[in-house]
Each structure stands twice: as C-alpha cells, then as structure tokens.
Amino acid sequence: MKRVVVGLSGGVDSSVAAHLLIQQGYEVIGMFMRNWHDESVTISDECPWINDSNDALLVAQQLGIPFQVIDLSKEYYDRIVNYMFKEYESGRTPNPDVLCNREIKFDVFLKAAMDLGADYVATGHYCRKVENTDGTFSLHSGSDSNKDQSYFLCQLSQDQLSKALFPIGEMQKSEVRAVASSMNLATAGKKDSQGLCFVGKIRLPDFLQQQLKVIEGDVIEVPDNLEQYLRYKMAIEKIEHSDLERLSNPFYYARNFGKKVATHQGAHFYTIGQRKGLHIGGRPEPSFVIGIDTKENIVFTGQTENHPGLNRIALKLQADSIRWINKGNELLNNDVLKVNARIRYRQPLQSAELIKVMDDYYLLFNTLQKGITPGQFAAWYIGDELIGSGIILH
C-alpha cells in the first residue's frame, strides 16, 4: 500500500483531498505545517493558524488517520520572509505563495514526508498532474477554471511533481463542498483562506515594518502625455523582435515629470498598479501607482487604469529564475514559442510569444498588459498545460 502525507491546512480542499486518497486505497497521514509565530501582524479573524490547526486535527480524527504538526517556521522565515523583505526593499513585489510551494511544501515538507516513509505528498490544489508516455509528468490547469491554482505551482521541478498528488484537480469547488458536507467534515462550511501560505492574512505594512523603515517621501503624479509614452506608442505600432529590450524596459520617471499630490511612508511599501492606500484626494479620476523609486524614495502615480505608464506590451524575465516543468520544452537561442501567459494569479490567459535571445527571455504580448510588476511571476501555457515560468525582471 502506497503511503501519502497530506498537507492538511484546516480548509475544505485539503480535507476532501485526504478523504479521496483514503477511498483510493492509500495509507494516509495528515500533517499541518506551522510556518508562523508572530501574531502581531496577522489579522486575528482571517485564518489564524491555531484555529486551522485545530480544524485539521478534527478532520484527521473524523477520517481516522494519524495527524501531526510540523514546525517549519525557521525554514519559512529564512526562505520566504527574508526574500519578501529584500524584494520590497528594492522596490519589487514578491509572490511568497509561489516560493512557498517550491521551497516549503514541495521541498522541506516533502523531505519530512519522505522521512516518514511516504511515497507521495498531496495538497488541496486545483490543478492536475498527468503522466506522459515517456514517464515524465506535466502540470495542467484545474478542471474548475474559477479555482485553477496551477499558477502557484509554476516553479515546481519534474522531481517535485513526480512525488505530488492533487486529488481534487478534476473536481469543481461545488463538488468538493458537497463531498465535505456528505461526510459532515468539520471544514465543510469553512470559507476559503486568504493571505500568506499557511500563515493567513497579514497587515502588510506592519509586517514589512519589522525590517523596513518608515521614511516619508513624495507622491508625484505624472501626466499621460509625456513624450516617452508617445514614442512607445509609435514603437508598438510596428513591433520587431529587435525592439524587445526597449519594449520591455519600464518607463523612466523623474521628480520634474509631474507634481506632488501627497506624501507616503516609504516607497518600498508600494507596488505597481496599486490603487488602495494612496490617500490621494481631490483628483478627478482614480490614481494608480505607475512607478517606484526606492533610491530617491518617490512614488509615481497616474490617473485611471488606462494611463500609458501602467500599460506595456512586453516584459523581460530574470534568466536564473526560469523553470520548466518538463525540460523537453526548453527553448534554444532565438526560438519563439507561441503561448498563453499570465503575469498574476487569476489573470485571464493572454496570447503572447516567449522569445529567447542568447541568455535572455522575453514575453511579447498581443495586447498591452496592465500593471507589469517586477518581482512577480509570469507563467506560460500551451492549451491547459503549464509549460514554465520566471520572475519578471522589468
């Protein structure tokens, strides 16, 4: 009998995943990951870890499976939290959940499961693993398009995927709820969690201020008729691959490009595309962050989500962050691959070309993309198969 360790999060998805594996004849062990100890920055009524751990225990008792809690808070801090601080400090916006899957769930947690003699680890992700005829594995979108979570697993390696199971990947969320209700599982009516992986929803400013200082600076509003925008508009009317570097470069801003409309508490606390928390009053239209300068401590904004500073046609990827689910899909120099891509979770897939030029990778989209954010992950698909991913360099 194959042994599976299920990452019981205290939510309905992982609860049903464990139940399905029992039905399929696996020997199942439930394990809850404790990744966080600092309650001062978590929002107490939004997925507190202690309640989740208790719910996971209740489900394990209902299912009649062994249960234990594993403390991975040191590894989580070293690999995820420190990464977040460094990225925000440099004016980039990290995606800790993608890293949590690569570095914690399917690395540290996976190794702990293997030490228990497990053959696999399982989670409640809405995605599908497919074994190919050559013995390799591919990762596909979940059958429920509204809940598809393949993006969060975009950095997994072939070895990690080979040891992973996603029991609810073929199901709709409504079906998962129905199974949980029919079993009277303790988590059947529990709402979906939000926030950091296995931590919960945090007060981001409080969290960041553990290491990043409050430094008052100016918010500069930039008009939408700068010459650089006009030149960019002309460039994308006739796109050539030789223009990739120029088209993927973020717009350059300086203080004299606009006027001061507010103050902020630190440019490193903001992200491209942000609308809430700007505290800008008296403007005719909603304001969005279009640029961040952490060296000069300036936040640049523009009015409306159609501001040209918020929309670009291409992005460049951080070369050493590129991951291929299956190495057989890797590009050679000057290769062009037509893909569908997303630059954030839940963004509808966008038609694009993935292009490799020497050691550099670019995504060239068919249409302008709103809020291209350095530090976030871009993931690319062919059909419903996730092929690879990389961090947005700029």
Image: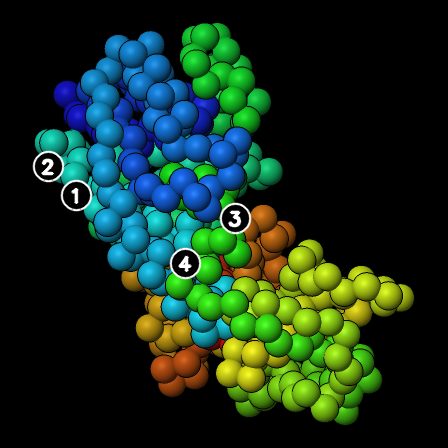
Identify residue type, mark 3.
Arg
- In 3D space, how far apart are the residues under numbered discs 4 and 3 (Cα atoms)? 11 Å
What residue lies at 34% left-to-right and 55% top-to-bottom?
80
Residue 268 placement (x, y as % from top left): 52, 69
227 or 240: nearer the eye? Answer: 227
- Disc number lying in front (3 or 2): 3
In the picture, the quarter occupied by the N terminus is top left
- In 3D space, how far apart are the residues under numbered discs 3 and 2 (Cα atoms)? 35 Å
Q: Which residue is mark 4?
A: 210
Identify residue type, mark 4.
Gln
Q: Earlier in the sequence, mark 3 or mark 1?
A: 1
What residue lies at 34% left-to-right and 42% top-to-bottom?
36
Say which element carries label 3: loop
Q: Which residue is mark 2?
A: 115
Say which element carries label 2: helix
Q: Earlier in the sequence, mark 2 or mark 4?
A: 2
- Above or below for 9 versus 96: above
- Disc number lying in front (3 or 1): 3
Tell me the tag on residue 47.
Answer: none
- In 3D space, how far apart are the residues under numbered discs 1 and 2 (Cα atoms)? 6 Å
| In-image side of 306 versus 253 (left or right) | right
Q: Residues within 10 Å of mark 3 (few under 14, many from 20)?
A: few
Say which element carries label 1: helix
Residue 48 placement (x, y as % from top left): 44, 33
Q: Earlier in the sequence, mark 4 or mark 1?
A: 1
Q: In terms of image quadrants, where is residue 147?
A: top right
Q: Are marks 1 and 2 in contact (CB under 8 Å)?
A: yes
Q: Are marks 4 and 1 in contact (CB under 8 Å)?
A: no
